[in-house]
Image: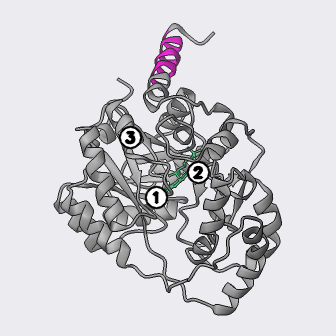
């Protein structure tokens, strides 16, 4: 069968379809459990969660499914704070705050790695079956600790070089994130511009250079995309945007609507929201802030500075000032349940396989 391979075997799942961990409230326990219950791997995006929120969400997922699931974390970045940079950014952000009636400016603390350490402890205590990472590679001891507790450890790469680095650090599998992908770029070696490799070029070149299974991500939204990725050597796919518009997703309504109404030429990669390049739907915030992009504080500082703007804009139904993360394939998005997304994918795949058996016509 097309779905029987090392990834499905090692993850103990039926279908090699992974729902991306998406931080920021998209991946509710209901979404994660629905995907796992349908035979894929649901993943909690815990990147921005406090340790307590992470634990509560994991416990909720366990109540909703007895199938394997994953938790996704961000490798911490701890840039120095420059008060001058922050003052400049605050000045540029002030007009948005005024329009939204936000009176307070966020306090920025020096980012540390302590949250990450606490999250890892929780994942170990809760015996989470799969732990995935982006924005870098976890320390070897962390990989070892997780593996000793029988967790499968998955990394993210945007180039062959990064995939090799994941393998060398003991990661069990690697997600290759093509340039089509929605959300933040996982690039951690070299410049992000040089690492904008399309999914179709990235999969076969990576497969030729690593022995660990390769999971394809970026622009995969239907059965055609899944089979194409697997033909190129991927042993699974990771899909983000397709699940953002699902019924169980916690994405804000204006975000879901923006994806459902977007076309392939409307997304752009921007650092204006968080200080780190991410693909989302072009809107007024991006257009106005792009000229300052080079001078903004680094991730996660800029992310902290824009948090209240993004949240308040969502409350006031102002999508023009929200971060509308989305991949390059939004025309294929649907507002249906996660279970229906998976069953549609399986139906499409069977249909393609049956057609090919009869001979392409
Ligand atoms: C709304 C959104 C949030 C995301 N958040 C994360 C995240 O927290 N961690 C992560 O590893 N990837 C994240 N991603 C990227 C996905 O892992 C994946 O690379 C991407 O969704 C694949 O492209 P697609 O959106 O076209 O399916 C996010 C993607 C989206 C659309």
Name the residue: 48% across, 53% down. Answer: 25
The location of residue 5, given as percent across then percent down, is: 32, 35
Q: Within 8 Å: ligand 1 and the Cβ of disc 1?
A: yes
Q: How many marks?
A: 3
Q: Which segment did they paint magenta? A: 346-357
Q: Earlier in the sequence, mark 1 or mark 2?
A: 1
Q: Is residue 147 left or right of residue 288?
A: left
Whether residue 232 is situated above or below residue 176 in the rendered picture: above
Whether residue 318 is situated above or below residue 353 in the rendered picture: below
Q: Within 8 Å: ligand 1 and the Cβ of disc 2?
A: yes
The location of residue 173, given as percent across then percent down, is: 36, 53
Instruction: Give me the disc on residue 30.
Output: 3
The location of residue 65, given as percent across then percent down, is: 27, 38
The CA distance from mark 1 to mark 2 is 11 Å
Instruction: Residue 208: tell me if it is visible.
Output: no
Whether residue 16 is situated above or below residue 82 in the rendered picture: above
């Amino acid at each position: 069968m097309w779905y029987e391979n090392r990834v499905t075997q090692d993850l103990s799942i039926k279908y090699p379809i992974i729902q991306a961990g998406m931080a920021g409230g998209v991946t509710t326990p209901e979404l994660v459990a629905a995907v796992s219950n349908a035979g894929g791997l649901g993943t909690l995006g815990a990147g921005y969660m406090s340790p307590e929120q992470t634990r509560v969400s994991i416990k909720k997922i366990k109540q909703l499914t007895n199938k394997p699931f994953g938790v996704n974390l961000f490798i911490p970045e701890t840039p120095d704070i420059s008060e001058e940079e922050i003052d400049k950014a605050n000045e540029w952000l002030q007009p948005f705050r005024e329009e939204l009636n936000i009176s307070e400016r966020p306090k920025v603390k020096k980012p540390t790695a302590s949250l990450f350490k606490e999250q890892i402890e929780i994942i170990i205590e809760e015996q989470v079956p799969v732990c995935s990472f982006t924005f870098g590679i976890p320390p070897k001891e962390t990989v070892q600790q997780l593996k000793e507790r029988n967790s499968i450890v998955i990394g993210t790469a945007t180039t062959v070089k990064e995939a090799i680095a994941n393998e060398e650090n003991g990661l069990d599998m690697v997600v290759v994130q093509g340039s089509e992908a929605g959300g933040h770029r996982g690039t951690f070696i070299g410049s992000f511009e040089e690492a904008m490799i399309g999914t179709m070029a990235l999969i076969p070149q990576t497969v030729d250079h690593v022995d660990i299974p390769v999971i394809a991500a970026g622009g995969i939204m239907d059965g055609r995309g899944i089979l194409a990725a697997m033909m190129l050597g991927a042993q699974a796919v990771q899909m983000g945007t397709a699940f953002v518009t699902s019924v169980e997703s916690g994405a804000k309504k204006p975000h879901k609507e923006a994806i459902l109404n977007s076309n392939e030429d409307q997304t752009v990669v921007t650092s204006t929201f968080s200080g780190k390049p991410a693909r989302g739907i072009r809107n007024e915030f991006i257009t106005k802030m792009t000229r300052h992009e080079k001078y903004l504080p680094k991730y996660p500082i800029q992310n902290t500075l824009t948090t209240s703007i993004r949240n308040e804009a969502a409350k006031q139904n102002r999508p023009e000032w929200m971060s509308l993360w989305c991949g390059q394939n939004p025309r294929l998005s649907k507002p249906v349940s996660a279970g229906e997304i998976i069953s549609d994918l399986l139906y499409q795949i069977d249909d393609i396989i049956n057609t090919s058996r009869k001979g392409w016509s």
